[in-house]
Amino acid sequence: MTRRGQRANGEGSIFPYRNGYAAYVWVTTPDGTRRRKWAYGKTREETHGKWLKLHEAARKGPVATSSPALADYLAYWLREVIVEPDYAPLTCATYETLTRLYIVPTLGRKRLDKLSLRDVRAWLNKLRDTCQCCAQDKDARRPENRRRCCAKVPSACCRQLASERTIRDAWTILCSALTNAVTEELIPKNVAGLLHVSNPRKRKVKPWTVDEARRFLESAKRDRDPLYAAYVLILVLGLRKGEVIGLAWGAANLDGAELDIGWQLQRVRGQLLRRQTKTEASDATLPLPGICVTALRMRAKDQAETRAANGADWTDTGLIFTTRAGTPFEPRNFNRRFETRCAKAGVRRITVHDTRHTCATLLAALDVHPRVAMRILRHAQIDVTMNVYTEVSDAKTLQALKRLGEQLDS
């Protein structure tokens, strides 16, 4: 038995230290230098076990001798790894927001190499039960006379909990960050990736019927809605919201009945950005049906009249869909206008993006081959198109779809 202060054979780097023992192993760090890596324990046996693990890690490859707090590492990761053009601007902004609001407040002070599976599980459980209005001081940031819940009366907490989708997104971001830490050899394993986190069920969206689509477009045309042509494009061609409001006149060949899709408009970190479309599969030159050509000619005429009325106050952006002053259309305002039009038309309220399902439904009702529909909708994978096709109802008939085009293309 080894007495305190006496080293066993081969344990020259293990010695008494303060109220226990300390040990070190010479390792090669990720930057290629040789340094000591220390381990501590209350007993020689505990320290010896850690010492053996350090030796094993040193044999396998580089070992980091110091570890930052998780918050510092995440700041580095967002600054150096999650950057353009490797990631889209909106993706970078989303990663930063979710990290700042949901990960750092609870886990930020943990040392990267000390973060455990239990820490991550406790964080997820706490996140599910934490009022985000309280955690983010949402009500407290309002003027005192406009406070209405958490900051006004403590007992009146509004219990604004994070959705399961938000929680999973935050966990996914943490997993991605820790995977990068493993790649950079800062930690041996990704503890967040060892957890099972349920995937929220996607809400089944019932697309508009042919009759609902007809009523919606008829309402917009009857009221001379400046966005009538935009509504036609998202329903007939399945364009995304950002693609529609990012369309320029230079992309529309009305005489040749073609439309080039290659750009989108997004608001990111307070700025409107006109950038490339979501994926390479999203870029396409699409044929314009008669109803689309007619709608775009109407839009050109209306915009010319508005430009003439505004004179010097008109801002020429070259975009098809603009405000009355010629400036780009705000994505959120487009959503609001779409919801208002749904109410005026007396149809079920769906989101702008859900109209892509309606477009696929209309194409399926026309017996358009899935591969052709995939090209029109610009899906990257045929599975996505087929999932929509399987939801088509028998009530959507070819005759109703033809009647839609005949009534609106006039």
Image: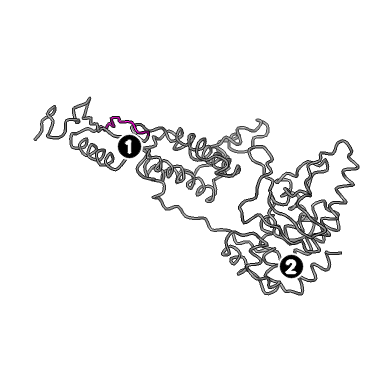
Counting from the top left corner in percent of width and height, residue 121 is at: 41, 46
Which of these two is toward me, 86 or 200?
86
Q: Is residue 217 above or below residue 64?
A: below
Can you identify the residue that label 1 sits on? 63
Relative height, residue 269 to residue 379 (above, below): above
The quadrant holding residue 8 is top left
Image coords of residue 341 (percent x, y) = 78, 54
Q: Secondary structure at mark 1?
A: loop
Residue at 49% x, 34% y: name it.
75
Q: Residue at x 18, y 37 (%)?
A: 45
Q: Are marks 1 and 2 in contact (CB under 8 Å)?
A: no
How many residues crowd around disc 1 within 10 Å: few (fewer than 14), some, or many (20 or more)?
many
Badge 2: residue crowd in 10 Å (few <14, some 14–19, many ≥20):
many
The label shown at residue 159 is none
Q: Main secondary structure of the magenta part?
A: strand
Q: Is residue 305 left or right of residue 12?
A: right
- Snapshot quadrant of residue 367: bottom right
Q: Is residue 335 magenta?
A: no
Q: Secondary structure at mark 2?
A: helix
* Amino acid on which the number 2 mark rests in the picture: Val
Start-end of magenta stretch: 31-39
Residue drawn 66% across and 31% down? 143
Q: Extreme left residue here?
A: 1
Quadrant of the snapshot with the C terminus: bottom right
Q: Which residue is denoted by mark 2 in the rendering?
A: 210
Q: Reply above or below: 397 against 207.
A: below
Estimate the x, y position of residue 130 in percent, counting from the top left. Answer: 50, 42
